[in-house]
Every structure is written in C-alpha cells, then in structure tokens.
Amino acid sequence: MKDFKLICTACGKEYSIERVDPRCDDCNEPLEMELVKKGKIKQGNPLQHTILERYSDFFPFNEIRNDLSLNEGFTPLVSISRIAKRIGLKNLYFKNESQNPTWSFKDRGTLFGIQHAYSLGYKKVGAVSTGNMAVSVAAYGKRAGFDTFIFVGKNIPAEKLNPIAIYGAHLIRVDGDYGRLYYESLNIGRKQGIYFINSDVTYRVEGYKTAAFEMCEQLDFDVPDYVVVPTSAGGNVRGIYKGFLEFKEAGIIDRVPKIIVAQASGCSPIYNAFIEGKDKVERVENPDTIAHGIENPFPPSGNAVLKMLKENGGTCISVSDEEIIIAQKEMAEKGVFGQPESCVPLAAVKKLRQQGYLTENDRVACIVTGSGLKYTAAFEKHNLKSHTCKLEELNNFIKDNF
Amino acid sequence: MKDFKLICTACGKEYSIERVDPRCDDCNEPLEMELVKKGKIKQGNPLQHTILERYSDFFPFNEIRNDLSLNEGFTPLVSISRIAKRIGLKNLYFKNESQNPTWSFKDRGTLFGIQHAYSLGYKKVGAVSTGNMAVSVAAYGKRAGFDTFIFVGKNIPAEKLNPIAIYGAHLIRVDGDYGRLYYESLNIGRKQGIYFINSDVTYRVEGYKTAAFEMCEQLDFDVPDYVVVPTSAGGNVRGIYKGFLEFKEAGIIDRVPKIIVAQASGCSPIYNAFIEGKDKVERVENPDTIAHGIENPFPPSGNAVLKMLKENGGTCISVSDEEIIIAQKEMAEKGVFGQPESCVPLAAVKKLRQQGYLTENDRVACIVTGSGLKYTAAFEKHNLKSHTCKLEELNNFIKDNF
C-alpha cells in the first residue's frame, strides 16, 4: 500500500492505510482516505483496462489485481435534452450506473473493498444488506474465491433473497434488530477475520470516486454545475465529491460542481438536519418511502455529509413518493429506467428549478444508481396501459387510433 | 447514406442501401449489407463517443445522430480463469451484454435500426417481440421521440408486459397467430409508415457487428479461437461473424474466430439441420426450453446461419435445460448472472470440450446476451440456500459452520 493516511472526517485523527475498521476510535465518525493531490489518468483505451488501472494514481494499491474485477464502471453519461428543455436547464445528464455488473453503483465500492481485503490477506468478506449491496458483495466475493457472508433480516421476501442467493455466498437470515446487526457484523468481522464491506466503509467510498472521474472525462473536463446524488448512508455522495476534489487538486479540472443531496421525504434525516442548520443527523422514526434503497433512518455518514455540504456550498432536498414515481416514468419514456431511488435526483431537480435554485444556464448531472428491474413492485404505482386487438383488425386499429 | 449495397444472403440479388424490407423479393431470404473492406477504428476515448462514432467507417450513415443513442455497447469482456481451468481451456471470456441500457444485446441492433429509420425520415418504429427486443425498441423508440409500436401476444403475463410498458410505447396485445404476426407487421409497416426493427432485419444485424469490433479491441487484436453465440432468429450470430470478417478485410485483425452456434435442445432447428447436413432449417413443432429468448421454432435467418457456418468452418451444438441451469449457477458463482439463454454458451463449451472438439490450448469467448434479472422464474430451478440464525448466536454460528 502507498504511503497515504486515513483521517477521521470529524476530529481529524489519523490512522494507518491498512485499517479495516471504518470508524474513528475517539468520536465514532467515519474515516476517509486523505485527499490525493497529485495524479494523472492512465492513458490508453478504457476497453483494455479496468477502473482500478485507469485511475490507479488516486488509490493506495501498489499491486492491482484485475482478476478481482468484473469490469465495472465506465458507465454512460446520457444527455437528455428534451427533459432539460422542458424543465428549463441548459443540459441534463444521467450517469447510468445500472450498466454495472450487478446493475447498480455498488459494484464500484465493492471492487475497492475487495481489493483492500485482498491487499491485507483476507480470505473472507461480508456485507449487511438486503438490496443492491448484498448482491454486489455476493458477486464480487465469489468472483474473488473468498468465503462470502451476507447477513439479511429474517423476514426478507423471496423476491429479494433469490437475486442474492444465486451467487452462492453464505446467506444468513438473522433474527434480531436489524440496526444492531450492522454494528454486530463489525464485531464478528474482527473475531472471525471477515472484512465487512458495508455501506460507507472507507474503501467503498474510495471506489465511488471513479464515477466522478468518469464524468470529468465524459464531459471533456468541463464539469457540470451540479451533481445530484440520491443519498442513504452517505457513502456514494462522499465518494463522488471526493473524486471531484482530487481531480481539482491534481489540476485535471478547474472547479468542483456543487453537490445536491437528494432524499425521499419518507426518510430524510440528512435533509431534516440540513434545513434546521444542525450538524448532526437524528434518527428518523418509522421511515416509509418507495425508494427503499435510500430508506436509512440513521445514516452512518450523515454527519460527514452535512459537513461536506457546508464545505462545498451545495444543498439538500427531499421529494415525495409521488414525485419519485412521476420522475421514474419521465426517465423511462426517454429510455432510462431506474429503480425508484434512482429517480429521486430528477424529482429533486424539477423542484429546485421551480424554486429558482437552479437556473436556465445550469448543467446538471443526476446519478441513476440502479436498474428499474431491481424493484418490480414499482410497476403497480404506474397506470401502465396496453391495447388489445384482433390480428385481422390490427392495420385498421393502428390507422384509426394513432 | 454511403454508396454500399444490400445483398441477398442466398441468391446474391442486390438492393439499395435505403431499403427497409429485410428480405429478398425473389427468394425471401434475409438481405445483408455488403462487406465493408476498408476502415479504421476512430481514435480517441470511448468514454467520449458512441459505438456509432467509433466504428463509423463500417456503417453506411453519413450523419450520425448521437441523440438517438443511450450509450450502448462497450460492454465488458470478463476473463474467468477458474472456469477455464476446470474445463481445461487456455482462456474463457464472457462478453457481458447485460451491461447495456436495457440490459441485453438487443440495444446494439436497435440503435442501428433507429439510426436507419431516422436517415430515411421515418417517425414511427415498431417491433414484434415479448422479450428483450420489445423492451429495447420501446426504450430507443421513445428516446428518439418516435411513435413506437410494440406488438405482443394476447396472453403475455404481467411480469413480461410491465417492463415493456414502463417505457410508454404503444403496446398492443394481438389476438391471433403469433407466427403470422411477424409477417403481418411488415405489411402494416409498409401501409402505415412504421419501420419494424424485428429480430434479424438488415440494420439490426449491422449493429451486432460492434460486439465483435469491441472484442477485437479488448483482446488487443489477438482474437479468440472460438466465439460461442446463443442463437434464435440468427441475427446476432450473423452480425458478430460479419464484424470479424470486416476487421479481417480491413487488416485490423489477421484471422476470424471459428463461430459456435449454440441452441437449446428443446428448440434447435439450426442444430437439427446442421447435423443432418441440410442447408434449410425446418420448423420445430412444440418448442420447449427454459431459454425462452432463443425459443424460435422457425428462425428467419436459419438458412443464412447454416451457410455462414459452412463458410466459416465453425460448428453448431445444442444443450439441455438441465445443462443450461447448471451453467447459469456456475457463471453466477463467478459473478456473472445471465438469463438462461445467456448460459447456453458455457453449457455448449463444456460439452464440446468433453467431446474433444475444443482443446486445452483454445481461447473461447461466450456471449452473455442478457441479465439474469430478466427471467426470475429460473430461480425456481435452483436449489437456493439460506441459513437462519438468532442475532445473539450469530458469531458462534459462523465460527462453527464455516
């Protein structure tokens, strides 16, 4: 490992780059790898190397193991001008993270967690999750040939369990408080030598930097004015922001976009603290939103995200389930079908444009975190239409009706 | 449009590049764009352009409309050495087409069909399909702002209907013979000005060339010995083969891989004709396989594929549903979860290695056509396991059992 440090996001205490425990011993806030201030993008064809290799200057690994990769990242940045025009923006981009190996953004973070686990000689990895992260860690853990442990709640429905189970990891339904399970997993990890690549652990956050790096390349280093990130634990938005910061420090881009943290009204602990001017999140009781992937009532990186927003000058906003569903349909009708949490950014952008926060000269990028196929229950919220017609009447039916 | 011709795959009759009707007026066999013999890969960063631009020398379009694209293609070629070793091959690659915008290979072909439709001034497109192609044409048609018509069978279940309907195309359940519907759609298309981008139409096949182009780049122009393609209508395998041929003609690669056409035993019209030495496929009665995406009883490019195999010197093989399910699990346990038809190539490779057709020095690439999330009924065929444990007993449970 290179000579970088881990630093507490709150108190600044320093730790070794090899540390696995993701939180500060003193203040229990998340640790972060120090800002990388020098580096270049590896030249050459992205079709011939991984994100680990392309951006290796910005990561601590001396030995890169491409056989741990499933060729994640290098996802599209799709410009949808018709939505931009309708809302009144100069440009609106969708970073389509559903085109990753397990069809969500989690794969970036998982890869870097796995790479760190490998660097330290671990042969066991794990995750506490019922959604995209469980799938991703199961896939990458098995790819690496590691003993892979996925802890889920006892009452997880089959439709969520099966897409995890297919990868063949040790899948354990745990009977007990799901919130406690996160912390208990870290204890078990220490005792059993299992590296838990949970939601906002240090190297997962590092992996998310690569989405920012790619957006810089995709826009030929003319970064958007705003980047909108659906936010739950806070790991993804922290990583994306850090990516822009590092490219700025390295002289690759000349400014950092403003970050917009987007939450669902049914579970918006970061938004609640932000509008009240607090620097600590409080637990949301009875979270309830269709955007299950961002339904974290007490986000472990919540305080770090609040601090980040203050530094960056961005904002935080929440949107209703109804607004999310409308955004999901609007995106699908332009060819991008995201799961509900992936549509929170568009709903947020529309609201911020109406409020005048965003203006007609702004260029905005939304992060589409995962595939619409991940949560088929959302179909029921749409009034999906089809027609029925006899074959022999089909030509006239079309002539008369369309 | 450039000065290329369309040529009948059977009788050689020539047609204008602008022709929409995909079949020969004389012999009713599929038309194909003439082989492009000169061209270069566009230099520059694939993160900054589309497959339309990167490989534009090999396509007839003068004006490229990137706003029709959803940034399809540039999908991973994942090397899985542990499976290669177990089977006894030098290298085994998986071209993971599930990382496309609608999570299947169809998007490549749809894009080029849409581009052709646009070039000719069409404002309406359509498809007859109940699976990946319906989803893909719905997404791209709406992306382009076209009136988009999807014809499906009357009794399509909701689980297949909803992922098409979400894109907002005109979705018509047609009461009548589904086989006749394909031909009727071409008639309606002529009358109503709808460009039907069905399974093996000329420009869909052209689009599939790009998967071959990418594999050449990904392997630094040292092509694999064999490429294995799950085959239904025959459009994908024809396109992939043509892509290698064109790169060979252009001097970009120095040989063309052998092509392996892989079918499911429950519906293998091309295999049946191949082993009997026939040059015409015959309709399969009562097709029945879990690989629904390749369950075409009378493939419209079947004869063209047989001719292609003779020219190329490759082979054709069929595998059972049981072999497909085993292959699906093996791939998932290395991180690549494909829908059943996507796992037919691995099952085929294992069989061909056992038969001695493939040998230990061979490098083989399998096409993973679509995401495992597309067909969740397959989960029932697996004996998927999970454990249940109380939170307070979790540490001991793991210590004792793994």
Image: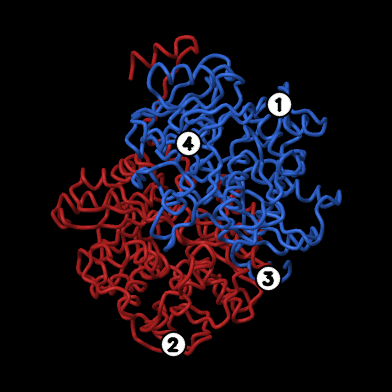
Chain colours: A blue, B red
Instruction: Answer above or below: position of B270 versus B29.
Output: above
Which element is circle 1 on?
Answer: loop
Q: Quadrant of residue A12?
A: top right
B358 to the left or right of A320 = left
Residue A35: x and y in percent read 56, 42
Circle 4 or circle 2, nearest the eye: 4
Q: Nearer the viewer, mark 1 or mark 3?
A: 1
Proximity of marks 2 and 1: CB atoms separated by less than 8 Å = no
Which residue is denoted by mark 3 in the rendering? A396
Distance between mark 1 and mark 3 Cα atoms = 51 Å
Q: Residue furthest left?
A: B356
Q: Nearest the camera: A271 or A6? A: A6
| Mark 3 or 4: the one toward you | 4
Residue at mark 4: chain? A
Nearer mark to the viewer, of 3 and 2: 2
Q: Is residue A62 above or below residue A130?
A: below
Tell me the number on the disc at residue A135: 4
Quadrant holding the C terminus of chain A: bottom right
Q: Earlier in the sequence, mark 3 or mark 4?
A: 4
In which quadrant is the N terminus of chain A drawn? Answer: top left
Give coordinates of residue A167: x percent, y percent: 39, 36
In the picture, the disc for residue B5 is 2
Please give left or right for residue A202 compared with residue B293 in the image: right
Tell me which label, 1 or 4, sits earlier in the chain: 4
- Circle 1 residue: A287
Q: Are marks 3 and 2 in contact (CB under 8 Å)?
A: no
**Nearest to the observer: residue B6 or residue A229:** A229
